[in-house]
Amino acid sequence: MKIFGKQLGSIYSIILIGASLASQALAQQNTASFELGSIATPRTINPAANSTTPSSLAGQQQNPFLGSVPTGIVSRDPIDLSLSDAISRGLRYNLGVIENQASLRQAQAQRLRALSAMVPSISALLRQNVDNLNRVAIGLKIPGLPNASGQFGFQESYVTFSDNGLNLDSMYRYRASKQAAEAQKLQLDDAGNVVALAVGTAYLQVQSSEARVETAKAELDSARELEEQALNRVNSGLAAEIDGFRATVQRQTSEQRLTVSAANLDKDKLTLARLIGLPSGQQFNTVSKAAYQPWIGGDLTSSLAQARNDRADIKSAAATANATQLAKRAAQLERAPGLSLNGYYGSIGPNLARSDATYSLVATVSLPIFTGGRIRSDIQDASAQLDRRQSEHADIVGRVDYEVRNAFTDLQAADSAVKVAEKNSQLAQRTLDQARDRFLNGVTNNLEVIEAQQDVAAANENYISSLFAHNLAKLTLLRAMGSARKDVNKYLGGN
């Protein structure tokens, strides 16, 4: 797996999924549906190749952050799942984190491989030889001697060593591999923030769906009560039959809304369970209720400063650029002379008790004179890689700045929207109460009550969507600042 794929440009919009969803929730008050398919995949690093490949965020290959390794035994009773528990499970079992952990181990293995090229290799040899030489077979005929030597044997033991690491280019390649491993470690940290964003968003969506189910139940109870009152008045001759028809239609509509809301809740729970690796079929209840809470973090200036200091992907990009700089220097030093040492020390004789010492030491100085343009091509390739990595680092710094500003703007808009939505919900409920009183006192028919019920339903949906957008804007801002994993409970833990 490799860093900074062609899809890196999509990370800018993908990491801002919270901000875009918040805008959608404010603009489309009848729905707050969320698609997790656009969660960003952190880059992974191949320190050996030090080149790029796109991370698949769309198409047939599924984003690894949408998957997990289901772990555990299904409990008969639903388990209580807090936001902190959900994120903790995501950090352990989400496939994106697991793949980044594997990539880190690969990067560390590449570092050890680069180190092994710089240190001597030592091995031991113990051998028993049994031979029978045939002079005819090798074309050697000596008059007076038999054609075969007869069987004979000898024993030998050696300690051999080889040191090819006395080359400047090997030293720089090792340093480059260390930087690449550090970059992958930082990328694993960034993957934790992506998991916090994905799991936190899915958790908020479950809570919104639960609120819609509770609202739909309340609306259904109100519709059933209105239907009963309307039918009683119709049967008593105090109201026209059309009032009963209206009330029945409203009750059936409320039943349908409850059915759809319950189905959406089940699907949202499946999505959350899939992200955090719950065993298949495990039921759970959310216990962290993220009610409205104003933003208590810093202002825009402090948020920008924190993002520049804390974002692991910025640090990872800087480490990758440094690794590429070292790789370019290593390519340039391929023209420098190299020194290698090879030798052995041992003993040989009829047996090890009667043997003579034998040894060899060879020092070689090599200087490339003509390589057919290979060194020049290595330098050119490393230089191009360096330009790319430096440009990507500068681009990430700019994108993080944009993400924080955009998330801050959405947070301010969502904060205002949720306050207005709460007031509208209260006013709509008061309007419904008055309309019901007017209907029961015979001042008007139940059309006014049904319209008031619909207004209440719309106002409740508006409040649920606005609250979801506000909490999601906070979560997105935390991700943009690089502290979603650390501070999510502080701002969204709820009661």
Image (spheres, grey):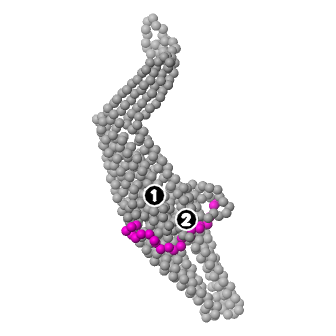
Instruction: Indicate the amino acid at tag 1.
Output: Asp
Magenta-colored span: 281-303
Give percent across and percent down for residue 238: 67, 93
Describe the element under mark 1 as helix, strand or loop: helix
**Numbered tag placed on residue 457 in the rendering:** none
Looking at the image, is 362 positioned above or below residue 169?
A: above
* Separation of residues labelled 1 and 2 (CA atoms): 19 Å
455 falls in the magenta region: no
Which residue is tagged 1?
190
Residue nearest the viewer, comparing 284 with 49: 284
Taking the image as shown, residue 436 lies to the left or right of residue 155, namely right
For image coordinates 45% across by 71% down, the residue present is 296
For image coordinates 57% across by 68% down, the residue present is 288
For image coordinates 36% across by 62% down, the residue present is 398
The furthest residue to the top: 144
Residue nearest the viewer, comparing 329 with 32: 329
Give percent across and percent down for residue 458: 54, 79
Q: Are marks 1 and 2 in contact (CB under 8 Å)?
A: no
For image coordinates 39% across by 67% down, the residue present is 302
